[in-house]
Amino acid sequence: MNRTRRLRKSEGIRRLVRENQLTVDDLIYPLFIEEGENIEKDIVSMPGIKRFSLDRLSSELDEVVSLNIPAVLLFGIPSSKDGEGSETWNDQGILQRTIRFVKKHYPNLYVITDVCFCEYTDHGHCGVMHNNDVDNDATLVNIAKQVISHAKAGADMVAPSGMMDGAIQAMREALDATGFYDLPIMGYSVKYASAFYGPFREAADSTPSFGDRKTYQMDPANRDEAFREAAFDDQEGADILMVKPALSYLDVVRDLKNTYDRPIACYNVSGEYAMIKAAAAKGWIDGERVMMESLLSMKRAGADIIITYFAKEVARILSNK
């Protein structure tokens, strides 16, 4: 009789035959930086996550570095907004100042920047509006300006989250034309118009003032379309391909891993985080075990990189701190 249980008999043998491992090297930690002073604001729908002003950010970064988390993903929240999101290419903007601060004081921490407009526009959409919809090509002009500003400030990687057609090509051409040939791009290659983003909109102050994002983010019903979206980013020069959200789209993570010879990332989004936190607070689940199991499922599906609000908690567990 075949007895697969022989290889489950003890923790020692389970460790030897374990197929996937979650490590701190897999993790990117998102951070929200708000323009102003003396801000350390709890995000109610995301227990444990805060918005910081730049003058209060050091304690958080000290912890990130002490836990050996390799990278952060920065989201800026400006004090002023307009129809185009022009603060995104202000060289003295909140994100640009944060990049310079982190690279000066934490030079070994890898800094990835969100390249988008929803936090910076007065309407909350991801670009220039025309006839109540985002004007794709007008937005690409501004994406080029934004990404150059991030590069000049010292970003290590840029990540366009708006799902504009042609964004990777526009960014690659802009970066190459200004001498930033070696700056990598992580494409939000497959980003769904998901209900799992709700808490993030509180965190980043990015709720659309009207309508939704279904005209430029993917329909959750579609799988084949994900191949087309990823193919465009691959052809246009994305260095890393991402799937967002993660847990409800693990089939797509596996599809990309099987298809592309590039690192695959996934974003363990705010709604996924909030659900585990809420259920754990009620005592309905073992929050720590569910957290670790859910992140391991992303690795098993094929993710090389996981962007997650759980990064600090996971790093503590893995390092026994």
Image (cartoon, rainbow, N blue to C red):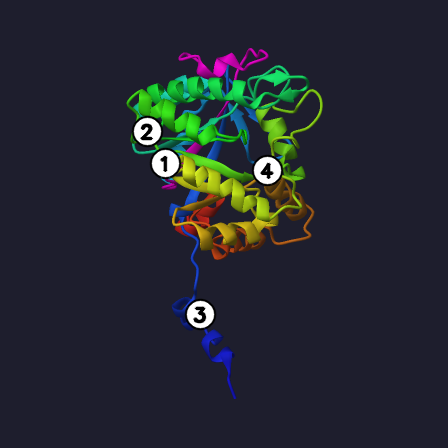
Say which mark, if any, is on residue 34.
Answer: none
Up-down relation of residue 26 to residue 179 (above or below) = below
Tell me the residue that label 3 is attached to: 14
Q: In the structure shown, which secondary structural element does the residue marked by tag 3 occupy?
A: helix
Tell me the residue that label 1 is attached to: 65
Q: Give the amino acid at mark 1.
A: Val
The picture places residue 227, in percent across and down from the top left corner, at 52, 46
Camera-nearest label, 4 or 1: 4
Q: In the structure shown, which secondary structural element does the residue marked by tag 2 occupy?
A: loop
Say whether disc 1 or disc 2 marks the residue closer to the N-terminus: 1
Residue 91 magenta? yes
Measured Cα–Cα span from mark 3 to mark 4? 32 Å
Say whether disc 3 or disc 4 marks the residue closer to the N-terminus: 3
Say which mark, if any, is on residue 106.
Answer: 2
Residue drawn at the location 52% of the way across and 88% of the way down:
1
Measured Cα–Cα span from mark 3 to mark 1? 31 Å
- Give the residues in magenta: 67-93
The answer to the question of whether label 3 and label 1 lie on touching residues, with beta carbons closer than 8 A, is no
Query: In the figure, residue 107 lies in which quadrant?
Result: top left
